[in-house]
Amino acid sequence: MEHITDTQIEQDRPTAVTIGNFDGLHMGHRSLIGLTKEFAKEEGLKSVVFTFSPHPKLVFKERDDFALVMAPSEKKFSMEQLGIDVYIEYPFTPEFAALSPEEFAINLLFEKLKCKVLIVGENYKFGHKQAGDYRLLKQLGDERDIKVIFVPSVLFEEERVSSSRIRQCLRDKNLEAANRMLTVPYFILGEVAQGKKLGRTIGFPTVNIEAHPLKLFPPNGVYATKTLYNGKMYYGVTNIGKNPTVNGTFKVVETYLFDFHQTVYGETIQTYFFEFIRSERKFPSVEALRQQMELDADSAKAYFASQRYDFWRNKF
């Protein structure tokens, strides 16, 4: 996969393009990308996903608490798995946002990308003050013999799937709904860092992930998770929080993996979240914490043995 992170996006041959923010790569995003790949294959084009970095909401600071379902490295990793030919993270600046819809569509998409098929969601807006929409793209495309196709919103439980809806599900600890809309369970991909090594002294050694600072985390607490390392999945429990029992002050993501006995500092792991177990709390002693960790592990094992996990059982 060719990965472009600057403004040098010119392509050497015609393309099929889809465009959007694609945060989380949920089922709606995947329908756009899947259709783009189909047209690319049928018409001998390159498949291109065009997105922006940083996310426009971070540039305009529309919300102080805005965070990403997927960190940039996680999104790139997922794009590679989807088999895209070209993945563009175009620099998003106030100057770029000031481009007219016509400038953006004609100069960047149609000319520089040599776009022959453009696929967008029905609610896609673009250009200065979001003045451009599918109808304008269709008009501009028709004038240049470029196919412009809009894809209706995907519904889950009779409501439109969106990154905003998924963010709210994660904040509400409704992981099952978030995961079903994402199609791949919410995950954290990162490098294993050295922690305080308290866990190993009480029989629960953990691996600590250094996650991206702009990533959205579910609320602090303990979760039933599965972790991919070196091509193998391991069941476990993951704590998101500050370790108040031992006076922790910084947020950490630490996972106790069942039947895992390796040292993996500096290596990359991927942890998938399935169910909330309990909120973070401070225990009166390290021994009380150890006893609770035993209960947490039992709760996670019970979840993975239950019907609640059936939807994912043969997928993860």
Image: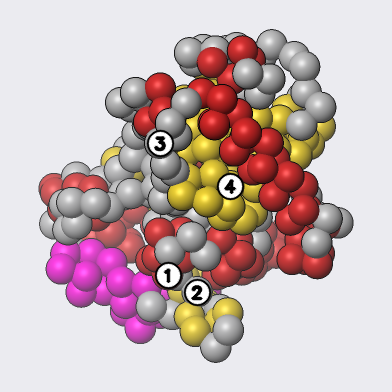
List the residue tagged with mark 3. 282
Q: Residue at x 13, y 48 (%)?
A: 95
Tell me, yes or no, whether the two marked residues, 1 and 2, touch with CB atoms within 8 Å: yes
What is the C-alpha distance between the residues marked 1 and 2? Answer: 7 Å
Which numbered disc flags the more N-terminal residue, 4 or 1? 1
In this picture, is 139 found above or below 180?
below
Looking at the rendered structure, the secondary structure element under dot 4 is strand
Crowdedness of circle 3 by 10 Å Cα count: few (<14), some, many (20+)?
Answer: some
User: Magenta segment: does it hold 142?
Assistant: yes
What is the C-alpha distance between the residues marked 4 and 3? Answer: 17 Å
Looking at the rendered structure, the secondary structure element under dot 3 is loop
- Closest to the observer, 257 or 111: 257
What is the C-alpha distance between the residues marked 2 and 3? Answer: 37 Å
- The circle on residue 161 is 2
Disc 4 or disc 3, which is closer to the eye?
3
What is the C-alpha distance between the residues marked 4 and 2? Answer: 24 Å
- The circle on residue 165 is 1
Q: Which residues are magenta?
A: 124-148
* Badge 1 amino acid: Arg
